[in-house]
Amino acid sequence: MGGPLCFASARELAAMIAARQVSAREVMSAFLGQIRRFNPSLNAIVARLDDDSCLALAEAADRRLASGAPVGPLHGLPIAFKDLEAAVGFPFTKGSPIFKAVMPAEDTVIVERLRRAGTIPIGKTNVPEFGMGSHTYNQVYGTTYNPYDRTKSAGGSSGGAGAALAAGLLPLADGGDLGGSLRNPANFNNIVALRPTVGLVPIAPTPLPMVGVSVKGPMARSVADAAFMLSVMAGADGRDPQTYPSNPQEFTAPLDRDWKGVRVAWSPDLGGLPLDRRVRMVLEQQRQVFVDLGCIVEEATPDFSDVDKIFLTLRSWANWNTNGALLAEHRAQMKPEAIWDIEAGAELTGEDVAWAIMRHGALLERMRVFQEKYQFLVCAVNQVPPFAASLDWPKSIDGVEMENYVAWMKSAYWISTTCRPAISVPAGFTPDGLPVGIQIVGRHRDDLGVLKIGHAFEQATGVGKRRPDGV
């Protein structure tokens, strides 16, 4: 079993290091032991520094603290950056053999902020090729497996991060989310992830700064820790024109509040999406939790007309414009799903993209009106529980055939398209012991409200305290 440091709250761990109740070296040593025991079977952390280098960095962190020099709020905590983030000193493969030898010359803004906050980088977390698809496997590092069942997928694209957190290999992890890449692996690994409002957390560098619904966000074993990490990730940055002024320090405050009379829209399948019966069963068992908190829970669903075409059009158009030249030169090294996705963008016309942008505006307005009545929308994160890691992707759900490799992710990417904050919180387990999460969606820019209701649900259920067997 992992030691207490490996499953301690990240907030508490950082406070203990700051108070010199435990050294960064002791913390690092505990996590390295856990990594040695479990990472070989999970393949969650890749491109890792050797133990001596990690310990030397931790000792340097201890010396800095002892000197009285200012330190950040995450000082001394080990971290492995997602392999879709450029981080100086580590390979930047994006899960593709095309980039296997790339060593970046500068950090992305998220890596920059996490370093400044005092984290100690020890490696990268595994991702699907180019982050495409929500199942983590690639030709560079291989497949990441689920700690709750090592024959199952850990999700993606932040699958390495999700598995590492669940198994106690890291205290916190960063992730990104276009169509579910934060929420899906959180759901599959019984942890927490917040997809922030578009623009709360900066993304830079990016070739398309004003297009799309992609975000960066925190992953943790509790909502409080996710909020803690968000406090150093959030905040406007001139390199990302979509960002807006905010107060990141509000995420460090207590998350308790009164929920009496708060209206919640209950829509597990978002109005008719196919939903695995095991997932539906877990979610229905948790509806009463919101009632017991004092919420007014009513069955209601926003009007998601055109959402599929909006999302897929904007996604494919961005993929073609960022990866089209890469496809022309390296087709033989790409997985079939990536080729399909990129080529779909080549067929789009200017009118197609204009239609998607205009319909997107209409969708956002319908969502705004819907949320004038309902402060929160509750639905499934994933439409299926963790599936066999040997599969490329689920081909059907509850007897309904999936038309492409992202179709099984609609409960996640429909919400992405609303640009609203959404959290995945552990909700229960299937009869065969596989994690199931619940998705709570808030109003535009009400990320704190989403964290607070996620925290209330988490505290009421305690599901997130269940660890994988043997860790």
Image (cartoon, helix red, strand yellow):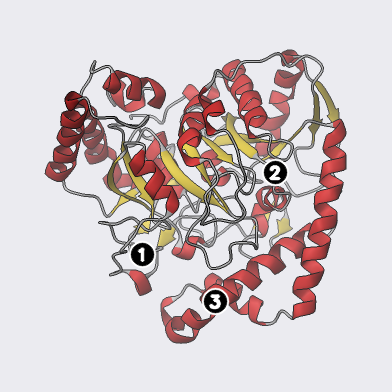
Q: Position of residue 332 (x, y in %)?
A: 43, 82
User: Of callouts 1 and 2, which one flags the residue occurring earlier in the amino acid sequence?
Assistant: 1
Query: Element type at marker 2?
Result: loop
- Classify 10 Å Cα crowding around label 1: few (below 14), some (14-19), many (20 and above): many
Give the label, 3 or 1, closer to the camera: 1
Q: Nearer the viewer, residue 326 or 282?
A: 326
Spatial CA span between label 3 and label 1: 18 Å
Q: Residue at x 58, y 20 (%)?
A: 255
Looking at the picture, does residue 432 appear above or below residue 354? above
Q: Position of residue 279 (x, y in %)?
A: 66, 38
Spatial CA span between label 2 and label 3: 29 Å
Q: Which mark is residue 466?
A: none
User: Of callouts 3 and 1, which one flags the residue occurring earlier in the amino acid sequence?
Assistant: 1
Q: Which residue is mark 1?
A: 93
- Specify whether 48 is left or right of 407: left
Spatial CA span between label 1 and label 2: 30 Å
Q: Label 2 sits on what residue type? A: Arg
Q: Which residue is mark 3?
A: 339
Q: Residue at x 44, y 52 (%)?
A: 109
Asked whether residue 145 is in view, the answer is no
| Residue 305 figure quarter | bottom right
Query: Element type at marker 3?
Result: helix
Q: Label 3 sits on what residue type? A: Ile
Q: Label 1 sits on what residue type? A: Thr
Q: Position of residue 344 (x, y in %)?
A: 65, 77
- Specify whether 138 is left or right of 354: left
Q: Position of residue 181 (x, y in %)?
A: 54, 50
Q: Which residue is mark 2?
A: 420
